Image (spheres, helix red, strand yellow):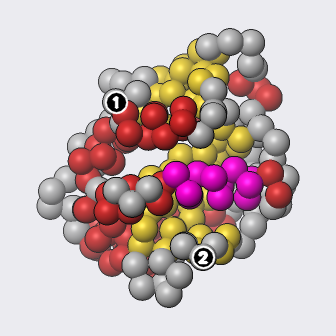
Amino acid sequence: MANTPWSGPVPAGLTTAEFVLRPIVADDAEKDHAAVMETREDLRLWEQSEWPADDFTVEANREDLVGLQERHAQRRAFTYTVLAPDGGESLGCVYVFPIGASFLAKSTVTPVGDDEWADVEAVVYFWARRSQMEKGMDERLLAALRTWFADEWKVERAVFVTNEQFTQQVELLRRAGLRLKFELVEPGKPGTYLVFG
């Protein structure tokens, strides 16, 4: 099951008055790097790693984006950059995985209630640039994503994942009325990821 290509629709993007989502490409490296570095303290909690390091470069970011672009083209996982309406600034990222993605297949998933992991259709991670979180954009992004998955991805059972230590995003998901459904532990990562749906 691991790395089975996604068989459902893959939207080209999402446009609202506040932001535009489209598949990330290597040429987004500079804009994405600026957003990543501004948000690095939050991303280290979210990733449960030292990424991004203080000396993370635009070129290293470009290499990462090449990989993200390739797996999107292969329909193995999907990464969308969140841009300002004029396309001039990166505001965050959204990542969409099938439950058969390699890292998820290797993870330990524990139901919190009666839900079955096998019933999940899409696993979504997202982050918003620190300056945008301070304006509440992450809340509006989450609301837009929930509608987008239902209407355009044709996914009824999408879940949203964050790390327990990234308390701002945990609270955001709870405020949005999402319920904790699973706890997920990735091999080699110290913290527990919380899965809301």
The furthest residue to the left? 55
User: Compared with residue 132, is residue 90 higher up or lower down, i.e. above or below?
Assistant: below
The furthest residue to the top? 113
The chief SS type of the magenta part is helix
Q: Which residue in the protein does label 1 denote?
A: 165
Quarter holding residue 79: bottom right
Q: Which mark is in front, 1 or 2? A: 2
88 sits left or right of 173 in the view? left
Q: Which residue in the protein does label 2 denote?
A: 17
**Quarter that holds the N terminus:** top right
Residue at the image position 47 percent from the left and 69 percent from the top = 66
Q: Which SS class for mark 1?
A: loop
**Quarter that holds the C terminus:** top right
Amino acid type, mark 1 = Gln
Residue at the image position 46 percent from the left and 34 percent from the top = 170
Residue at the image position 43 percent from the left and 23 percent from the top = 192
Magenta-tinted stretch: 139-149
Q: Which SS class for mark 2?
A: loop
